[in-house]
Image (cartoon, helix red, strand yellow):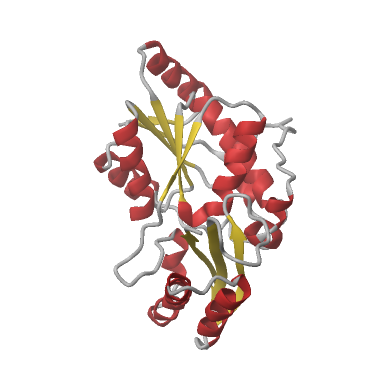
Amino acid sequence: MVILRTQDEIKSYSLEMKKAGKVIGLVPTMGALHEGHLTLMREAKAKTDVVIASVFVNPVQFGPNEDFNAYPRDFEGDCQKMEKAGVDAVFHPTPEEMYPDGFCTYVNVEGEFTKKLCGGQRPGHFRGVATVVTKLINLARADKAFFGQKDAQQVCVIRRFVEDLDIPVEINMVPIVREESGLARSSRNMYLSAKEKEAALVLSRSLNKAKEAFDGGLTKASAVKQIIEDEIKKEPLAVIDYVEIYSFPELEEIEYINREAIMAIAVKIGKTRLIDNVILEG
């Protein structure tokens, strides 16, 4: 597994792979890897010839009161996991390498759907995501890029700017990977105490309860949403950030779930903000 630390190094590597006729898969990450990330990498390995993963905690997608400095970092441990997952090259730049002096160009996706869910709670977040993902796709010369469903709104944003800017890459969304308890795997789970981790099960539990009601014939979005909210409110450590049901992937308001839709939630457990979602077939 090759470790690439500069933009020139990844450009040279990806160009060499392209000249050899290889199909390149890209898996962007911020490190602190868990089974969810590794599933993306294995999926990329199955669908492409060469897998490039990035490990970069992107400062421009963090808000002023968010946890950039505290975000977990374990590059050595990440490398061991990536090698086992079959990753061919790892791009691990510094912020100064990605955003050198004079950098002043950003990708803004301005559709209404970016102002909902995490976009509504974290102004400027998707500007940072869109900018870094654009750079990574270009540097890696990626044919396919892989992202997790847990960040479903992010996938919608990426697909939008890739289409709008005619970027020749296929965006793949991979289903959520969960712990045996049902908790969606996340780098932020390591912030949780044992008691908080138990409390965090309310996210998947509430979504499952709502899905059961939907599968049983309940299609009024407000009623399904109420089931989620009522279940979360039973957990004393949980504070609701948002509970929403939108059409998917458009993220439009719907009264009845009669087409593909997403139930998306964000909940604070102690000081840790967790997200989860379930996609429903309407």
Asked if residue 34 can be seen in this view, the reply is: no
Query: Where is residue 274 shown, x and y percent of the image?
Result: 52, 67
Q: Is residue 132 depicted above or below 150 in this figure? A: above
Quadrant for residue 87, please give it.
top left
Question: Would residue 179 be found to the left or right of residue 13 on screen?
Answer: left
Q: Is residue 226 depicted above or below 282 in this figure? A: below
Question: Would residue 207 be found to the left or right of residue 34 on screen?
Answer: right
Query: Where is residue 101 shown, x and y percent of the image?
Result: 70, 32
Query: Where is residue 278 shown, x and y percent of the image?
Result: 47, 62
Query: Where is residue 282 shown, x and y percent of the image?
Result: 51, 59
Q: Is residue 238 depicted above or below 74 in this figure? A: below
Front residue of 132/68: it is 132
The residue sitting at 62% across, 47% down in the picture is 59
Q: Is residue 224 depicted above or below 156 in this figure? A: below
Asked if residue 241 can be seen in this view, the reply is: yes
The residue sitting at 52% across, 81% down in the picture is 232
Quadrant for residue 225, please give it.
bottom right
The residue sitting at 36% across, 14% down in the picture is 21
The residue sitting at 39% across, 69% down in the picture is 183
Q: Quadrant of the N terminus?
A: top left
